[in-house]
Amino acid sequence: MSYTALVEHFEQLHHLQHLGAICGWDQATMMPPGGNEARAEALGTLAVLCHRQLQEAQLPDWFAAAEAGPLTPEQAVSLHEMRRAWRDANMLPADLVRARSLAGSRCEHAWRSLRPANDWAGFLPLFEEVLNLSRQAASARAEALGLSRYDSLLEQYEPGMRSRQLDQLFGNLGGWLPDLIRQVQERQRHERVLAPSGPFPTTQQKALGLEVMALLGFDFAHGRLDVSAHPFCGGVGEDVRLTTRYDEQDVTQALMGIIHETGHARYEQGLPAAWRKLPAGQARSMGVHESQSLFFEMQLARHPAFLARLAPMLERHFGPQPAFVPDNLARLYTRVEPGFIRVDADEVTYPAHVMLRFEIERDLIEGRMEARDLPERWDQLMQQYLGLSTKGNHKDGCLQDIHWTDGSFGYFPSYTLGAIYAAQQAAAMQQQLGPLDRLIGEDLPAIFGWLQQHIWQHASLLETGVLLSRATGQALDPAPFRLHLEQRYLA
Amino acid sequence: MSYTALVEHFEQLHHLQHLGAICGWDQATMMPPGGNEARAEALGTLAVLCHRQLQEAQLPDWFAAAEAGPLTPEQAVSLHEMRRAWRDANMLPADLVRARSLAGSRCEHAWRSLRPANDWAGFLPLFEEVLNLSRQAASARAEALGLSRYDSLLEQYEPGMRSRQLDQLFGNLGGWLPDLIRQVQERQRHERVLAPSGPFPTTQQKALGLEVMALLGFDFAHGRLDVSAHPFCGGVGEDVRLTTRYDEQDVTQALMGIIHETGHARYEQGLPAAWRKLPAGQARSMGVHESQSLFFEMQLARHPAFLARLAPMLERHFGPQPAFVPDNLARLYTRVEPGFIRVDADEVTYPAHVMLRFEIERDLIEGRMEARDLPERWDQLMQQYLGLSTKGNHKDGCLQDIHWTDGSFGYFPSYTLGAIYAAQQAAAMQQQLGPLDRLIGEDLPAIFGWLQQHIWQHASLLETGVLLSRATGQALDPAPFRLHLEQRYLA
Ligand SMILES: [Zn+2]
Ligand SMILES: [Zn+2]
């Protein structure tokens, strides 16, 4: 009885979140600029309502009563996830929730024009407000959870993960990755790579993107593809909204972006329908989410066997050219080159971008660094990790990401966790189903079936470590990722 | 203090309505089909929340306290409009609200397939249920408001309007309109009208539509144009969402549809920013709303001076053809022909469609007629007003409109009230600013300025009668409408 009441209560919350997800998507894709202030206010009110739904006074009683009653094992997990959501929401005062939502919307919206203008001075006061509120939130969470301030934010995106583990992980990567980057660059120095020559009209790029999404099993009855400044995968499981952005001079970026978001989308579309409206039915963590997008983008789409299938599709949409030969595509899509922009980075240098952000955001949140010092610190770490200077070049430096504009501190490690989880999954899949080569060339559905069975259908019904161990036989382990890079880039 | 609390409370309601408006727009324009069930549930939860916001137990106390305190005249009106919204939401028992909503969606949903199948027998039981519940709602509202049952429904769409006035109005129209229709038809019998010859590609039609919207002063920073099966004007004042549908064989319908919705949109965009989030800041009534769309569509866009400006735009988008000559456009857009379908009717025969529906819906609600007698009565009135029989042809007869399927009895008179208000406004404008001819040809901004000053900026701060009298010097008066028709169609 109490469990039933809880289900109804959390389903209502899910409905509110549905409205927020669609209006958030609209804000980034469809909304005219003059609509932003009203939208920010409306979403702020919704955030308060969602928060209030989780502050319902009867919840603790219902939790206690439900725990006393008979529950299936899955209902017990479901209850645990409800409690987690409740705990997260009750750590922060409503005023702070509202203030964060407002400041985040404002900063993010301004960022959309400040970044292209390279306007750090215009961005700083908005960002200081976001940081200030995020620190307050981190303090409140840290106290309630008995964690450090940064770990309390990390816990939102990757439950159970601690910065101590990340220090170890990045320590491990730091031990071999710089050398691997050098080796790969040495090896690729004399490689001849042809760049596809454009222009590539947006409509054609979109048509190709839709075709590739279909090949990857995206369900168009439950989702769509649009354009936004910063690509994302939003919406709800029944209606997943992907976005990308097109550059008519470059066909490679938007396509890989679409494939990446399609990985996110298939996870969302593959979550178990029976649990969809409850916390236990949501994606496990952002790291697991990124593992799906990176599985699609890195393990699958940059694999020579996939590029061999992509080549004729490119020719069909843009006409034949020497750059579209599979071997060249493979060289193109595995080109390693330290660069400024995280989202454009190859999979070998990508972890360096994440390490930089992890160090900075931890220091910002722990109060060891101030917002105004961001450009200098960014420049210093970019020089150290990738040998590049971003001095004065804010738009390609510390202004490049959307994450901090709305206070999503603690998110960045998810990308590298995802890359590592994905490599573990690919290794396990090959052990169980045979070489990826053949699967990609002839049996993509077997790959999707494996992911459905081992990842998607479990939603949040398993903790990340258990999910990963059952699927791959190992907890978090960077070894398969290292092996993958060595085999793809040095073999 | 209490007034401030009320402002905050109603602003929250407005934010919820904002989310509903955007998600409703998305449902009609963007949503993939598989998303509908989840969306319907989410919007259902939102409707309950909005209703609950108006049932807040403290509201009567806040109203009383606010009334006792010092209020500016505008705040007093604002309070009055808050009370009106509160009263409307609290007149009906929750069970009845729920039953109506359910029966309405069931009937509306079935209607979408029953209408094309001409299936009156299948429609009748569903419609009887809707009618039965609408009668109950009307009784409850009538008792609370001290009005007749039908008037209590009319009050929802056109506050202050009574069926006694509508009887007078339609009595007046009935006295001269049938003869006018005959005269116009006689006069047009030998007129040669060229139909534009297509196809007219959708992208070109949209480009033309956007250009015409810009000419009509639509603010694209606060709105956009999309496609939906049933055109509408939605969104919120800060972000107005118009829709249309394109037929590649016909350039005339989508364009006039866009112009009509642009009239609705400019009203919404022109509502006073300071009042936007409160009931007093909303559009005055559905009649006033339709007066703006019909001003744009009928008074303005079908005027020869406007068609002279439209001609070169049509040529630019579709190439020259004889049908695009201004004189032919004028004949095309003022063609009068009695037909079955209200939404396709010209401005001369349109009131006959409304009179028929008014008579029938009033009798249905007042219990003077039963649902099963609808087809016969419809046929009889169609023969009487337009000389057409709908015997056995339900899909082009009593099944053609969506309004009654979800119980929106009392809405139809808004269309003719709008046409009459629009004619009054056009007459007053000409008296004050000079002939429309010149204004349309050379000074459209003067027209929009007049509407802004006399209609848009007043939102619901004036009652309809006062708004209209101040703007035009007259309360509701069909004479300018008659004069307009005589001058345009018989001069
Ligand atoms: Zn991602
Ligand atoms: Zn209209």
Image (cartoon, coloured by chain):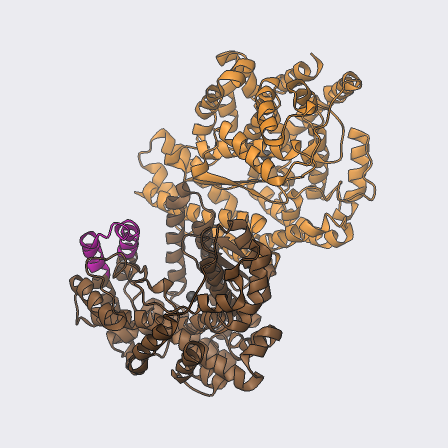
Chain colours: A orange, B brown
B211 left or right, relative to A333: left
**Position of residue B397 in the picture relative to residue B54 (left or right):** left
Name the image quarter holding the N terminus of chain A. Answer: top left
Residue B1 shown left or right of residue A202 in the figure: left
Q: Is residue A344 left or right of residue A477?
A: right
Tell me which residue sits at (43%, 66%) in the image: B192
Residue B296, percent from left and from top: 49, 70
Ligand 2 is found in the corner quadrant, namely bottom left
Can you say whether A275 is above or below B364 in the image? above
For image coordinates 18% across by 70% down, the residue present is B367
**Quarter residue A485 falls in:** top right
**Main structural element of the magenta stretch: helix, strand or loop?**
helix
Observer-nearest of B235 and A158: B235
Q: Is residue B267 above or below residue A135?
A: below
Magenta stretch in the rendered image: B102-130
Q: How many dots with numbers? A: 0
